[in-house]
Amino acid sequence: MAMSEGSCRFGLWFVHVHWSGAVIHRVRFATTAIMGPVPPLIQRYCAGQPVDLSPLVSIAPETMGEVYARIFAAVRRVPYGKTATYGEIARRADTGPRVVGQAMARNPTPLVIPCHRVVGARGIGGFSPDIGIKESLIAMEERGVKKQRRKSPDPRGVAVAGKSPGRRGRQ
């Protein structure tokens, strides 16, 4: 399949995506656009819609070694709207927090491997090219989770067929 590239907006930034089918080769934040398509899931995500990006595949786990593959797998399991510390990811991946930080800095596919969800124990941690992007991504996901909760009568955040919020428990 041919490689595609394009960009979409996320706030003041453009999200450049290099991709082929469901395989994402590179994601970068930039101040200028590149013309071309972007996978619809990433477009919806950048527009603020709560989206599950797990159908997309990052090239990173296959190209960056076993330790990084374990780290990236652990980061992909951090749910939308939640965060985990570098130390928590390190424990899950059987490595050290500094190695997790290095993996996040070298992550070629942010959003698909949601490195913005990895934070420091005493602060937000880093993000390239601008820490404000990480703050905005975390805030957007938190708003998305709150919006989903308001829509869903089920405490797990899943709509329950046949039940309305006012009739919960009454059949």
Image: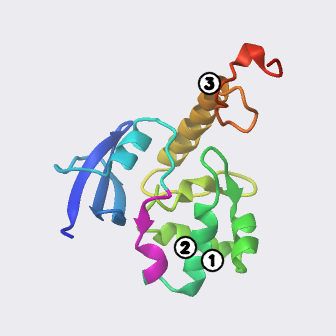
The span shown in magenta is 54-62
Amino acid type at circle 2 is Ala
Residue toward you, 43 or 16: 43
> Quadrant of the image for the N terminus?
bottom left
Q: What residue is pinned by disc 1? A: 99
Confirm whether residue 128 shows in the render. Answer: yes
Query: Quadrant location of the C terminus?
Result: top right
What crowding class fits label 3: few (fewer than 14 Cα within 10 Å), some (14-19), or many (20 or more)? few
**Helix, strand, or loop for circle 1?**
helix
Instruction: Say which residue appears at 68% left-offset and 19% top-offset.
Output: 164
The reply to whether dot 2 and dot 1 touch (C-beta < 8 Å) is: yes
Q: Earlier in the sequence, mark 1 or mark 3?
A: 1
In 3D space, how far apart are the residues under numbered discs 2 and 3 (Cα atoms)? Answer: 36 Å
Left or right of 12 in this view: 100: right
Tell me the mark number nearer the camera, choosing from 2 and 3: 3
Amino acid identity at mark 1: Val
Magenta stretch: includes residue 140: no
The crowd level at tag 2 (other Cα within 10 Å; few <14, some 14-19, many 20+) is: some
Q: Amino acid at mark 3?
A: Lys
Q: Residue at x 76, y 33 (%)?
A: 155
Residue 103 badge: 2
